[in-house]
Image: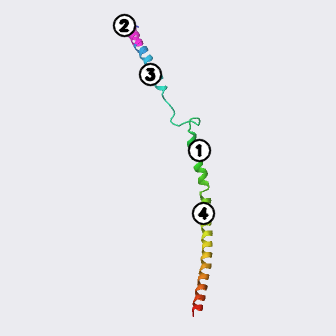
Amino acid sequence: MSPRAQVFLSRLEEQDRDLTEIKVDEVLGFVRHIRPKVATDNTMPSWVVLLVEFFLDERRYVLLNVVLLQRLRRAVHCVLLHVFMHVCVLDHGLSLRHRSSSL
């Protein structure tokens, strides 16, 4: 190799050596701030987990609650209908007696 080429290569090597040190420092600075996009199990907020579990547990009983409320409504309706029929019979009987007694 010619001495001129050796001088050129040594200058290039010195320039590259300085640049690589700068790049290494920048890369280490950038990598330090990178975080995962998905949270791990240890960093998951516990109140969110409890809220989701609560809603899933309550969803399980929604159909049962609807059926029980419908049965309760039907039972109340039947009792009120039964009482209303007794009142109608009594009212009808009282009205006949009053008319017959007033004549």
Q: Provide the residue designation for mark 4.
A: 69
The quadrant of the picture occupied by the N terminus is top left
Q: Are marks 2 and 3 in contact (CB under 8 Å)?
A: no
Q: Secondary structure at mark 2?
A: helix
What kind of secondary structure does the magenta stretch mostly adopt?
helix
Distance of label 3 from label 4 (alpha carbons) = 67 Å
Residue 26, numbered circle: 3
Q: Which residues are magenta?
A: 4-14
Q: Secondary structure at mark 4?
A: helix
Name the residue furthest top. 3
Amino acid type, residue under disc 2 in the picture? Arg
Residue at 59% x, 50% y is 56
Amino acid, disc 4: Leu
Mark 4 or mark 1, whichever is nearer to me? 4
- Judged from the image, the secondary structure of the residue bearing numbered disc 3 is helix
Instruction: Give the class, few, some or many, for how many residues have Cα within 10 Å of label 1's Cα (few <14, many ≥20).
Output: few
Which residue position holds label 1? 50
Among the 4 quarters of the image, the one containing residue 75: bottom right
Marks 2/3: CA distance?
A: 34 Å
Q: Is 6 drawn above or below residue 52 in the view shown?
A: above
From the viewer's side, name the closer residue of 27 and 5.
27
Give the colouring mode of the picture: rainbow
- Estimate the spatial distance between the alpha carbons at disc 4 and disc 1, rounded to whole Å: 27 Å
Mark 1 lies on a secondary structure that is helix
As displayed, is residue 31 above or below residue 62? above
Identify the amino acid type marked 3: Glu
Which mark is first along the chain, 1 or 4? 1
**Residue at the disc numbered 2:** 4
What is the spatial separation of the Cα atoms under label 2 and label 1, in whole angstroms? 74 Å
